[in-house]
Amino acid sequence: MQYKDFKDGIRLSCLGMGNMRLPVHDDENKTIDYELGQKIIDACYEAGINYYDTAYVYHGGKSEVFLGEALKKYPRDSFYVADKFNYGANPDFKAQFAEQLQRLQMDRIDFYLMHAIMDSNIDNYLNCGCIDYFDQMKAEGKIKYFGFSFHGSVEALKKMVAIRKWDFVQIQFNYYDWYCNIMEDLYKILEDAGIPIMVMEPVHGGMLAKLDDDIKAILGADTDTEQAEWAMRWVLSHPQIQVVLSGMGTMAMAEGNIKTFTEYKALSPEEEAIVEKAARTLHAKIAVPCTVCRYCTPNCPMGLDIPEILRFYNEFKVNGPWRLNGMKGWASEKLPSACIGCGTCTQHCPQSFDIPRYMAELAEQLEKMGIK
Ligand code: SF4
Ligand code: SF4
């Protein structure tokens, strides 16, 4: 297993076990398969993984309970647990923190995060008083290191970083988001600030291990494991990365990841070029590659910020509908539902995107989510 120094003499395994996609039974409630889950945790522990990540909301609150049980047999000082406060699930941060310690059956949480900060909820976290409280918990030894996980814009991350010196930050980080999204900018902000980065979604929720045949051919990787290995090696090639989390739901995933992180080889420049080609080919297939030239916007009779809406469209297609929560709070006349389908934008777009179709698809999805 590869390790990296963190601080205070702590060495963290470069691979961390994420507990968001644990194995589940095929029942109505998708209850966690404790037997298989325990085997995966045991395999991780025996391979030297010492970082275990969970959150208040994972598996409907049952992930923390499972993790506490699964780690109980190991000495408490031989591993680190990361857990997260979720404002949306319960703004009462004191009650949530107390409940988390109880669920985990622990008297401290080593790495504690404010969960999934984005532009639409950043002020809730900053204004609710939780930061002072978690600082107090840190002073009392109930939290060792304090940070946040992040899904927002470059501006929002700059705002967070300017507030204080965070112990660490967790971001989504993978080769797709680097070449086709804002990930490079986010990484550089954290690198410049000297903040260690915990990585989530290194394989983009599994997308980079289930590639189409043409992209597999670019990478020369047939199996899911080989594709995941490319993604993990790419992530690890970035020096500011501290821990790469993987939600290991099967033994095969655990074994594949452990092998990758034990026999790690940095990517060569030639290999990086191959990964970039794979990313760009994938992007062209699944998203709208808007260049933000803004030729379309002056001609929209409804004054819609078309490239920004297309950015959300891509987030929706690639990451799922929940990313549209970032549009909560938008004025109704700025939402995709305000589009009248005139098609003027398409006429002015150098790439002739069928923008009215994307607007209609987004409007339908936002309506389902009650964002209107
Ligand atoms: S189709 Fe919609 S987005 Fe495009 S110019 Fe017309 S109103 Fe604006
Ligand atoms: S004209 Fe086309 S490429 Fe340019 S910002 Fe508008 S949608 Fe994007």
Image (cartoon, grey):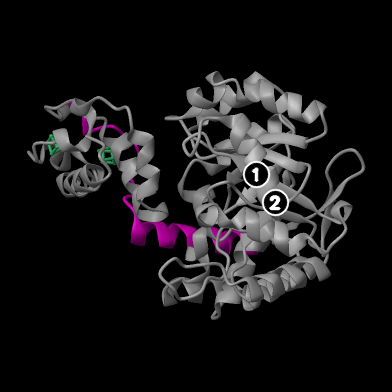
For the residue pair 64 and 259, the one nearer the viewer reads as 64
Q: What is the span of residues highlighted in magenta in the rendered image?
A: 269-298
SS class, disc 1 = helix
Q: Is residue 129 above or below residue 262?
A: above
Q: Quadrant of residue 183?
A: top right
Instruction: Answer whether residue 277 is magenta in the image.
Output: yes
Tell me residue 344's x, y (percent): 11, 37
For the residue pair 246 and 97, the one nearer the viewer reads as 97
Can residue 56 be seen in the rendering of this structure? yes
Is 287 on the left-hand or right-hand side of 123? Answer: left
At a point 16% along the width and 49% down the height, the residue shown is: 357
Residue with the mark numbered 1:
100
Q: Quadrant of residue 3?
A: bottom right
Is 271 on the left-hand or right-hand side of 109? Answer: left
Tell me which amino acid carries mark 2.
Leu
Tell me residue 130's x, y (percent): 61, 25
Residue with the mark numbered 2:
104
Question: Which corner quadrant holds the C terminus?
Answer: top left
